[in-house]
Amino acid sequence: MISLHGLTKVFPGGVRALDGIDLTVADGEFFALLGPSGCGKTTLLRTIAGLETPTGGHIRFDGTDVTRLPPGDRDVAMVFQDYAIFPHMDVTANIAYPLRIKKVPRERRTAKAAEVAARLSLTELLRRRPAELSGGQQQRVALARAIACHPAAFLFDEPLSNLDARLRLEARTFLKRLQRELAVTTVFVTHDQAEALALADRIAVMSDGRMIQVATPAEIFHRPATTFVASFIGSTPMNLLPAHATAAGLRVAGATFPAHRDLTGDFTGDGDLTYGVRPEYLDLSTTERPDAIPGVVSVLENLGTHTLVTLESPGGIVQLVVQEGEEPELGTHAWAVPRRALLYRDGALLT
Ligand code: ATP
């Protein structure tokens, strides 16, 4: 179990990369840190690893304070984006390297390297050097090296980001299965929301050194706590439209939704609101209806089995997903009928 208490990191020069982080990662949990570039993900991971010293707060592993412990004494294995495997060593020597540092006898570490290599389908490659391996194979060597020393936790910093799209998907599935089998606490940094949703038991969405929301992938996807999280999650981002509460109901982009509609949040009362609806939760109507957002079809994008439709509505652009073969004509009028929507006031979800 990794627990962080008021963890703060201010770099010389004044950048507050971590701003009072409180978090507990459960034993065996696969935890993703997600957020835009510069939000503090890598700094947080490096601080957990002991590669950065926090300027405030505490880190505990299973209740023991490790804040001042050097990296080598923390029993964690870190895998970086660039793998950092040694070019002059073959695969066996790379995998066995942490065991060599621990002074494990040569025979035992070679046997251990072979055992871990088999698990990662690297047996045929044990004599090769990194330059003779593909990106995906190099990444597996880095993982194998992390696994070989049986750490109490894995810390991954975008380990899949140097792989091409197809390999990345394969590696993702592989990593998830491996983490399940090993049941080792894992903190995984990514800026790819799809990767975080697919892999993690829980996700923390970060911005400016803070955690904006910590929740399961389903909760983050279906009930993003803020409009920032809402716009960051989903392969096509959530539609966020200005809305206004009136006596007749909620006015959104030329539509009026009666108060009882399946909306999360009480929108009665004054003030401007933001109406959030995912493209997957909008149905297309080619006939006019008062409770649907009107628009003109301006773009059609082929997603394979689906098509992403862009409507120009009075409230701005609205995107929705239709089944293949159900696309409207470009330039025609169409209406977007929401099935499931959320309301935000001042950027925060109304509950
Ligand atoms: P990315 O996804 O681009 O890797 P990140 O979320 O991992 O970004 P960090 O690398 O943790 O972000 O950086 C957080 C902030 O701290 C940034 O503003 C960055 O410029 C700053 N920062 C990071 N390392 C240092 C350093 N050694 N000295 C000064 N500022 C730093």
Image (tube, rainbow, N blue to C red):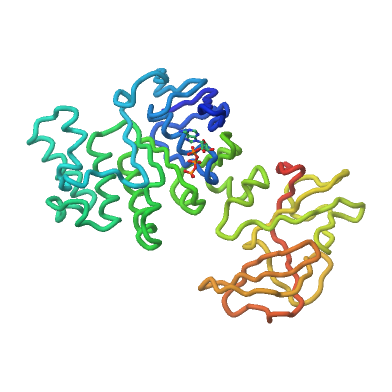
Question: Where does the image place residue 242, in percent across and percent down from the top left?
Answer: 79, 54
Which of these two is toward me, 248 or 197?
197
> In which quadrant of the rendered view does residue 212 lie?
top right
In the image, taking residue 100 as reference, residue 200 lies left or right, namely right
Q: Residue drawn at (52%, 23%), measured in percent from left and top?
A: 5
Q: Residue drawn at (49%, 41%), measured in percent from left and top?
A: 33
In the rendered image, the residue lying farthest to the right is: 247
Which of these two is toward me, 22 or 173?
22
Which of these two is toward me, 91 or 223?
91
Question: Where does the image place residue 205, in percent across and percent down from the top left?
Answer: 56, 41
Question: Where does the image place residue 198, in percent across and percent down from the top left?
Answer: 46, 52
In the image, taking residue 204 as reference, residue 85 lies left or right, namely left
Where 116 sits versus 23, above or below? Answer: below
Where 113 sits versus 193, above or below? Answer: above
In the image, taking residue 297 as reference, residue 186 lies left or right, namely left
Looking at the rendering, in which quadrant would you find the C terminus?
top right
Looking at the rendering, in which quadrant would you find the N terminus?
top left
Question: Where does the image place residue 77, in percent across and percent down from the top left?
Answer: 31, 35
In the image, taking residue 20 as reference, residue 252 lies left or right, namely right
Count of numbered labels shown in the rendering: 0
Where 236 sits versus 308, above or below? Answer: above
Q: Residue drawn at (40%, 52%), measured in percent from left and top?
A: 161
Q: Residue drawn at (15%, 53%), measured in percent from left and top?
A: 128
In the rendered image, the residue lying farthest to the front is: 13
> In which quadrant of the rendered view does residue 99 lie?
top left
